[in-house]
Every structure is written in C-alpha cells, then in structure tokens.
Image: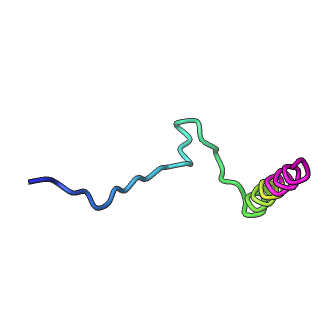
Amino acid sequence: MPIVIDEVVISVDVGNTAAGGATTPPTATEDRQSIVAECVEKVLEILRQRDEA
C-alpha cells in the first residue's frame, strides 16, 4: 500500500545569532526602504530592456 504525503512543513529561524545571524531585526522603515529600492531597480531594469528592444 503506497504512502501519500499531503503536506510538508518547513520552518526556518532567521534570527539565530549562534549561526551568525543579525543581532537585531531591521526596523519597519529599513525593511520598507529595502523593498522599495529593490522594486525600483527591477522596474528600471525592465525599462532598460524595453529601450534596447
């Protein structure tokens, strides 16, 4: 009889200082700024690709 696995749960501790993680989590403002900066970079890259085509 075959065994069927319906769900796999994976958890990660990203703030683990023993493994060399950050000592303090970034503030909400820093987190938002990094997300906005990444989005701006991606949009600019898409626009550059359109201009080249």
User: Which is the main secondary structure of the residues drawn in magenta?
Assistant: helix
Looking at the image, is 40 positioned above or below residue 20?
below
Q: Nearer the viewer, residue 5 or 20?
A: 5
Q: Which residues are magenta?
A: 41-53
Task: Name the residue rendered at 86%, 49% in the picture.
Answer: 53
Could you tell me residue 24's position as x and y percent? 66, 50
Left or right of 24, for residue 46: right
39 magenta-colored: no
Could you tell me residue 52's position as x and y percent? 89, 47
Task: Name the residue rendered at 64%, 44% in the picture.
Answer: 22
43 magenta-colored: yes
Left or right of 51, for residue 23: left
Task: Name the residue rendered at 73%, 58% in the picture.
Answer: 31
Could you tell me residue 46's position as x and y percent? 82, 54
Quarter of the image that includes the N terminus:
bottom left
Q: Nearer the viewer, residue 33 or 41?
A: 41
Count of numbered circles in the view = 0
